[in-house]
Image: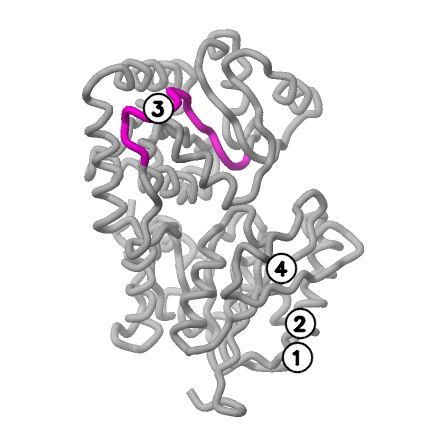
Amino acid sequence: MSTQNGRTRVVGLADTVVGYGSPQIQRFMASLGAHHGVRATILEPEVKGRKSVHEHYPELDIETIRIGRQPYAWPPGRAEYAAKLAKRIDEIKPDVLVIFCTFCLPALLRAKHRPKKVVYYAIEMVEPYGDADVWLNAHFRDRFDVIVFPEHNRAARDAIRCWLLERPSVVMLNCANSRVDPEPILPATERNGRMISQGSIGYYTTFANYFLIHTSRSFPIDMFGPISGPDEMHDRIRKLRHNVQYKGIVDNKTLGALRRHYSWGIVTWNPGKENTLYAASNKFFEYIASGVPAITAPHPQHVQFVRQYGCGIVMQEWSYPSFVAAISEAMLISRSSLYADYVGACKKAAGEELNWEAQFDKFLAVYEGRRLGPTVPLGAT
């Protein structure tokens, strides 16, 4: 790729503050920059309550876009962020532009500069954003040199919905952990005996109400992440004083250091919408990478890998009785010699397939043209 001064300018547009969720953003940009022999730049939004942790990623140049409104208070906040992203695109003039999530796509409407390559990393499904974003995706489809999806069912549905079937695409699992430099996994005998539930805490989206039911009070669970939902629920979660406790919001690096000490990790999303039914949770793969077996609701991608490697427990369904049954089973396993097998299965899965290097190699095959044409699996279920 010929560029000014012989150096490729690689820029990514993030939909969240780097270091708080979506760890694949910084891993992808660092890897793509290294592939081109340059330091990549990430443009991120300023979000109230999320302190910048740029020092955690010295291999990247991270720039915070300051706006008058919260970016998620859209349309006005999102529109302002898109306008300022477009301005920086025209100033930096990247050769390779990576757009993370449909949330950042409006920047292309305003930017005059046309990068030589555009990678669209579809972190989120389009449907929850509405018809306008379906149109945006279809409108820009010919500009996308590669589309990255995190889950096969999501890929199939959004590719059809947004007329993306003919574009080169690849499914990259949300595995940000390294195979070359894996996380240190604590022996099964050195765990704290507790369970971790990390990420978004929502009354409707992640069944936060399950943790508030009286029966749950005996479960040894620590919750990390932002709370959404009725104000009453915010107060009740923050005031938890029994075995179930709320630990607040921490950055990815801090969370990773804490996570490895836990015995189990909980993943459950309300399946009422496509994007939550076909969850591609970072936390599922982060648990596995830390050697923490997962207790997961029956989301298709999670079921696939738990069955393949034996690295966790799958709830029978999304109901509270199924939640209680799975938690109870995990507590029994923790007290037996079987628990070490679950930890070993996590280590095997992370080493063989569920790691960043394996996933980025799939992307490079499409990016470099070694695998041509659309790769969306239309037979996904």
Q: Is residue 189 magenta?
A: yes
Tell me how far mark 4 sits from mark 2, CA to CA. Answer: 13 Å
**x%, y% of residue 269?**
45, 33
Which label's residue is closer to the chain start, 3 or 2?
2
Residue at 35%, 73% (x, y): give it. Answer: 367
Decide if residue 8 is on the left or right side of residue 47.
Answer: left
Q: Are marks 4 and 3 in contact (CB under 8 Å)?
A: no
Amino acid beneath label 4: Glu
Estimate how packed mark 2 is, as few (under 14), some (14 to 19) or many (20 or more) residues with alpha carbons within 10 Å. many
Residue at 35%, 70% (x, y): give it. Answer: 168
Image quarter (top left, top right, bottom left or bottom right) of the C terminus: top left
Which span is picked out in magenta? Answer: 186-200
Instruction: Look at discs 3 and 2 and give the one toward the viewer.
Output: 2
Estimate how packed mark 4 is, as few (under 14), some (14 to 19) or many (20 or more) residues with alpha carbons within 10 Å. many
**x%, y% of residue 256?**
45, 41
Which label's residue is closer to the chain start, 4 or 3?
4
Which label's residue is closer to the chain start, 1 or 4?
4
Residue under label 1: 90
Q: Which mark is residue 317?
A: 3
Between 212 and 34, the residue placed more toward the observer is: 34
Tag 1 secondary structure: helix
Q: Which mark is residue 44?
A: 4
Tell me how far mark 1 sits from mark 3, CA to CA. Answer: 49 Å
Residue under label 2: 86
Estimate how packed mark 1 is, as few (under 14), some (14 to 19) or many (20 or more) residues with alpha carbons within 10 Å. some
Amino acid beneath label 2: Ala
Q: Which mark is residue 154?
A: none
Tag 3 secondary structure: loop
Tell me how far mark 3 sits from mark 2, CA to CA. Answer: 44 Å
Between 85 and 257, the residue placed more toward the observer is: 257
